[in-house]
Image (cartoon, rainbow, N blue to C red):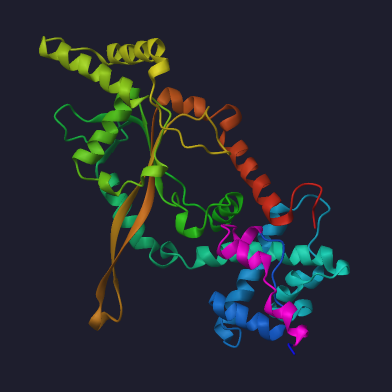
């Protein structure tokens, strides 16, 4: 006779596990883990990549725990909210296996502390991925190999107060209002961004490194792109197609105006910059229904934010191994380029798409994902 007591175990499957493995659900979005005891917790952590029997692994995880607790306290909690002492104080938690066990509890009396344990683990998970990506290992080499060709192509004349892209060009180069290297994202900022975007993991955090060109006119914005490609500063086969965004000016209308300008040039006409700008404006007004923009939705910004943005990948080469047997290690790393004219740049700085408002929306979404929707706080 079959042992019927085995059937519940034999046919029992974790819904959370299946949702993550085959259901496309992020581990950050499941309600609980399924770890029942200390040994299971150690095996779970070992599969995750850390051996809790190893002092160095333990210290790394405790450091990650401290950073996660600090971020939650400093950036995600509202006034009056507090993480239970049992979970943030190492002397009370005693062992990180307890955090996993508490995060798996189904006891009604553990409901609140179970959700707080999950909140800490969610933030720890993002920190672990950020700590162990390529940028953390090869930051200096990545920045140098991506940024130096861009910086070398620009002349800053402090006396004249000008910034010129391609000063050696026959026409004297492209005058810029600004060339900005995006401030390096702090780890906390990266954590918030990853928490706010369910589809993101550290591997797909594509804008850690980036630059912004602010030009005088829309025409010059497209000239910047042409310059970067023609001078082999970027290789357009390495563009990530689904990350391109153009809400500045439609490519089809721009090329039509360029064809007209080429015809006028062949007749000996030399249109001024103001005339080119006016032609582009008139074409946009008269043919708006035909405009072919490329818009990648972003719930934290929106259609009011206008720019050209794309993600290029650079093949980075670094030396690894002992000095006597070093070898080249190559990998692609993404970086973002934004281009916009000055009028658009000024408009983007104000209104509902301003940077502070953008960050506030990100923080709210990250908070909701870590702590639960408003009204369902731990």
| Position of 215 relative to 121 (above/below) | above
Residue sitting nearer the eye, 17 or 350: 17
Q: Quadrant of the C terminus?
A: bottom right
Residue 287, given in percent of the width and then of the height, sits at 38, 13
| Position of 370 relative to 5 (above/below) | above
Q: Quadrant of residue 157?
A: top left
Which residue sits furthest bottom?
Answer: 1
Q: Residue at x 41, y 68 (%)?
A: 137
**Which residue range is magenta in the image?**
3-29
Left or right: where does residue 236 sit relative to residue 187? left
Q: Residue at x 43, y 22 (%)?
A: 343
Left or right: where does residue 73 sit relative to residue 50? right
Question: Residue 216: within the magenta?
Answer: no
Does the rendering let one see residue 72?
Answer: yes
Q: Residue at x 57, y 81 (%)?
A: 46
Q: Quadrant of residue 23?
A: bottom right
Residue 7, given in percent of the width and then of the height, sits at 73, 80
Residue 374, given in percent of the width and then of the height, sits at 77, 46
Left or right: where does residue 27 sit relative to residue 291? right
Question: Residue 4: within the magenta?
Answer: yes
Does the rendering let one see residue 217?
Answer: no
Disc tally is: 0
């Amino acid at each position: 006779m079959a042992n019927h007591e085995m059937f519940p175990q034999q046919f029992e499957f974790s819904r959370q596990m299946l949702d993550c493995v085959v259901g496309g659900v992020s581990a950050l979005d499941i309600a609980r883990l399924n770890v029942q005891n200390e040994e299971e917790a150690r095996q779970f952590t070992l599969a995750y990549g850390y051996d809790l029997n190893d002092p160095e692994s333990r210290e790394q995880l405790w450091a990650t725990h401290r950073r996660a607790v600090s971020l939650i306290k400093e950036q995600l909690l509202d006034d009056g909210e507090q993480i239970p002492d049992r979970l943030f104080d190492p002397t009370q938690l005693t062992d990180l296996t307890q955090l996993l066990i508490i995060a798996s509890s189904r006891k009604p009396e553990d409901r609140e502390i179970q959700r707080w344990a999950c909140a800490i683990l969610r933030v720890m998970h993002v920190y672990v991925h950020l700590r162990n990506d390529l940028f953390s290992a090869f930051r200096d080499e990545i920045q140098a190999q991506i940024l130096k060709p861009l910086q070398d192509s620009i002349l800053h004349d402090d006396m004249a107060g000008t910034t010129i892209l391609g000063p050696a060009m026959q026409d004297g180069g492209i005058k810029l209002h600004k060339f900005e290297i995006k401030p390096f994202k702090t780890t906390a900022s990266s954590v918030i961004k990853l928490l706010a975007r369910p589809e993101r993991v550290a591997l797909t955090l594509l804008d850690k490194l980036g630059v912004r060109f602010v030009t005088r006119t829309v025409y010059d914005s497209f000239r910047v792109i042409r310059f970067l490609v023609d001078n082999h500063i970027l290789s357009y086969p390495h563009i990530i197609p689904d990350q391109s965004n153009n809400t500045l000016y439609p490519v089809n209308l721009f090329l039509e105006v360029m064809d007209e300008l080429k015809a006028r040039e062949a007749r000996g006409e030399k249109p001024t910059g103001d005339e080119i700008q006016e032609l582009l404006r008139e074409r946009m007004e008269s043919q708006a229904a035909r405009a072919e923009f490329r818009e990648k939705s972003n719930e934290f910004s929106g259609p009011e934010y206008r720019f050209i943005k794309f993600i290029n990948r650079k093949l980075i080469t670094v030396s690894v191994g002992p000095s006597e047997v070093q070898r080249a290690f190559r990998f692609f790393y993404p970086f973002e380029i934004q281009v916009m004219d000055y009028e658009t740049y000024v408009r983007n700085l104000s209104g509902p798409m301003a940077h502070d408002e953008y960050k506030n929306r990100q923080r709210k979404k990250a908070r909701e994902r870590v702590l639960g929707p408003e009204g369902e706080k731990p």
